Image (spheres, helix red, strand yellow):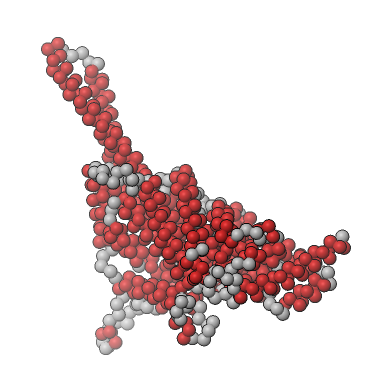
Amino acid sequence: MLGMGELPALRKRCDTGAPDLLISEGRCLYVILLMALYWCTEALPLAVTALLPIVLFPFLGILPSNKVCPQYFLDTNFLFLSGLIMASAIEEWNLHRRIALRVLMLVGVQPARLILGMMLTTSFLSMWLSNTASTAMMLPIANAILKSLFGEKDTSKDMNRENEENQASLQQNKLYTVPTEMQFLASTEDKDLTEEKEVASDALSDLKKEEEYKTNIWKGFLISIPYAASIGGTATLTGTAPNLILLGQLKSYFPECDVVNFGSWFMFAFPLMLIFLLLGWLWISILYGGINLRGWRTKKSNIRVDAEARAREVIKEDYRKLGPTKFAEQAIFFFFCMFAIMLFSRDPKFIPGWASLFAPGFISDAVTGITIVIILFFFPSQKPSFKWWFDLKAPNTETQPLLTWRKAQETVPWNIILLLGGGFAMAKGCEESGLSVWIGGRLHPLEGVPPPVAVILITIVIALFTEFASNTATIIIFLPVLAELAIRLKVNPLYLMIPGTIGCSYAFMLPVSTPPNSIAFSSGHLMVKDMARTGLLMNLMGVLLLSLAMNTWAKSIFQLGTFPAWANIHAENATSLLTAVENVTLSALNKI
């Protein structure tokens, strides 16, 4: 944000009629449009495109390198890095698989319950791991269960083929001449064959219905996992990149804003996630036959009973293969709980957090997260023996820690850190060049829109845009505009910025919308029309639920009912800068 000391210099430049300000805005706009084009088309890798501000901003005179480069290693980036390292440790010791199988054993093996179990587990993992990793972890488990449920699928096709071959042979046999003395017996056999044909046709229709049922359940399973991952990622700040980009851009635009942290975000987003997850489960289960509204009392076929019994055995067998809980799993689970509890209780706002014991402003969520994950690199993975300290003959063997740096290097997606940094650098360039204020000055037609209507429109536009572009790139482009629009509407900036951020995660209609969608679609069992018809209502539900949340419990958590002082300071600076920009424009026009 432009400081008060920078405004006199800016006014001085404007009074002299120098058009440097407008030139800086235009250059910054060019860089943003170029990056947006590369992000949408993926002409360059996303992380490489995110590095362009380091080169273009200094060369074009927008921002010096000593202001651009630090944006790539803000404390927000380290908070996200701590979450990625914790996820790497969880994967290393298969804790995620034990949790998933345990949940599935508890919910039961009926298709609707299994879908609910898969969605609950995937969303929980996605709160702490990346959405892509959560989907990749859960799909193998889902495939194993589906194969056990539908093990009769190929067999039933073979039975159909055998029945057809038998019927063809019978028809061929009828063409053969029958001896006269056997006519009576033949006529009796024909009656029996007619009855057998009727029974066979009934069996074939039942098998056909069973095949359709299996296909629908298979689709419901596969489509529920990426949807649950996208929904679950919104519940925590570290769950998905757009949430952290919001936090980083808030610190850049509104340094005095301290109402958004891990605890306050969780209190707002977790109830929203649960409601959306429940409604999404009902929709998927009804659409794909997991819940039959017409047949609550219909007796299950023997095929389904046998399939569910096999699925139950597969889940139990996979859980038994994990063996007894290892010391490393217990340790990881303990540190994972500590990670969540310490982040939540640092500064929950409704009560003083443990950070109040230290100097104000010194402890952030990044400090908390990195503190926990550093312990993972030296805490032993095997239960230490206290006898070792007293046994002089004990061998001095090296103990493997819970996580090695080599494993972290291999599994942590470092490109996401660069992508976040590129977003923060872009936001800094918009702010320093005055481009964000210039954009705000062009939003006059929207000043008459009621704020609740603006929330719905913003969520719809961003949810549609992110169907075709990266959600990270989408929120990087839209957040500066939403911040300035909020200033023009005189509403709390969070009232527009939070729906825009969460709306980026509501991309359900196309396989290319998110990596989790692409992973599920690559299984070969889903079609684009399956995702389109399922995702359309999911998008609509997400927009309405988000609007409900922003106008109810979010108002008390983020104090959305008032225009805050930290936004008012920014508005005063922006007004002064906008006046300066208008003066420059008028001066240039007068010269023409």
Q: Could you say where residue 495 lies in the image, as x and y percent from the top left? A: 56, 65
Q: Residue at x 80, y 71 (%)?
A: 14
Q: Residue at position x 20%, y 27% from top?
A: 196
**Residue at horizontal 67%, vertical 69%?**
431
Q: Does residue 489 lie above or below 376 as drawn?
A: above
x then y, percent, for residue 32 = 66, 61
Q: Is residue 198 left or right of residue 143?
A: left
Q: Quadrant of residue 235?
A: bottom left
**In this figure, what is the number of numbered marks?**
0
**Residue 52 is drawn in which quadrant?**
bottom right
Above or below residue 179? Residue 112 is: below
The reply to whether residue 136 is in sight is no
Q: Nearer the viewer, residue 554 or 61?
A: 554
Query: Do we see residue 172 in this rendering?
Result: yes
Between 247 and 329, which is closer to the camera in this rendering? 247
Q: Quadrant of the C terminus?
A: bottom right
- Image quadrant in which the N terminus is located: bottom right
Image position, residue 560 (x, y; %): 55, 69
Query: Residue drawn at (76%, 74%), measured in percent from left and top?
Result: 10
In the image, farthest residue toward the right: 591
- Compared to residue 6, the image places residue 133 above or below, namely above
- Residue 380 quadrant: bottom left
Q: Residue furthest top?
A: 180
Measured from the top left, where is residue 33 in percent x and y?
66, 58
